[in-house]
Image (cartoon, rainbow, N blue to C red):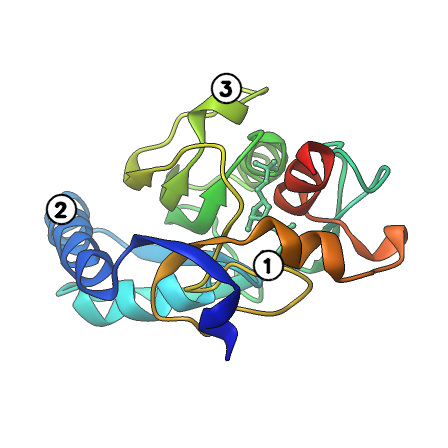
Amino acid sequence: MLEDDIAQVLISEQALRARTEELAARISCDYAGEELILLCVLKGGVAFLVDLMRCLTIPHAIDFMAISSYGNSTESSGVVRILKDLDMSIDGKHVLIVEDIIDTGRTLSYIVANLQTRHPASVRVCTLLSKPSRREVEVPVDYVGFEVPNEFVVGYGLDYAERYRNLRFIGILKPEVYRKIHIPSQELPSPQVSSADKEA
Ligand code: PRP
């Protein structure tokens, strides 16, 4: 059972749903009458995007970007390669980036700067989780679901070695799990993975 690898449920399914409804109500109000594109950064943001969009009461489009971080496995370099770009133009549109977690802030900082060159009406950020204690680059975040401590969190889109994304809650992974699973270092791009590995 995947649940057996979880030390503690940090945010329950019910709490996730309630907070998502609150954020969606605010977003629906803030963007009423505007052309809104929700931009999901694959893959971790998918679960949050799907639940958030179903709670929105205003028309909107969705689009996706896939990125990969350069640099070694133990730090997010912030130098990002776009693996899949947006399908649509954001010229004159309001873009709301939907993320699962902001850790160092490097990924988001790159994406925001990249999007700004495309002349959107605005670029804002909605993240389910934020780890302020890990921040290295300040990025303005407009909507935050929960601030979380510097623990190794998985579930509801967040993975370790591509596992646990399907959990309906956010949980803290047992340290013995990420010490046990062996993955070649070049396949560990996630800063979140690396932070826990460094602590391990
Ligand atoms: C996570 C998350 C953010 C990024 C945040 O993605 O979804 O995109 O890391 O880290 P940062 O603030 O330190 O830059 P990850 O690389 O784990 O990929 P995934 O979403 O496909 O799991």
Secondary structure, mark 1, is strand
First-in-chain label (2 vs 1) = 2
Does residue 151 lie above or below 190 as drawn? Answer: above
User: Which residue is nearer to you in this view: 129 or 113?
Assistant: 129
At x 17% / y 64%, what residue is drawn? Answer: 14
Residue 106 lies left or right of residue 179; in this view the side is left
Tell me the number on the disc at residue 24. Answer: none
Instruction: Tell which tag, 1 or 3, sits nearer the viewer.
Output: 3
Nearest to the observer: residue 167 or residue 94? 167
The numbered mark at residue 26 is 2
37 is higher (above) or lower (below) than 81? below
Circle 1 residue: 65
Q: Counting other residues with Cα less than 10 Å from the Cα at mark 3, is it few (<14), some (14-19), or many (20 or more)?
A: few
Q: Nearer the viewer, residue 36 or 105?
A: 105
- What is the quadrant of residue 182 in the picture? bottom right
In the image, the residue with mark 1 has its CB under 8 Å from the nearest atom of ligand 1 = no
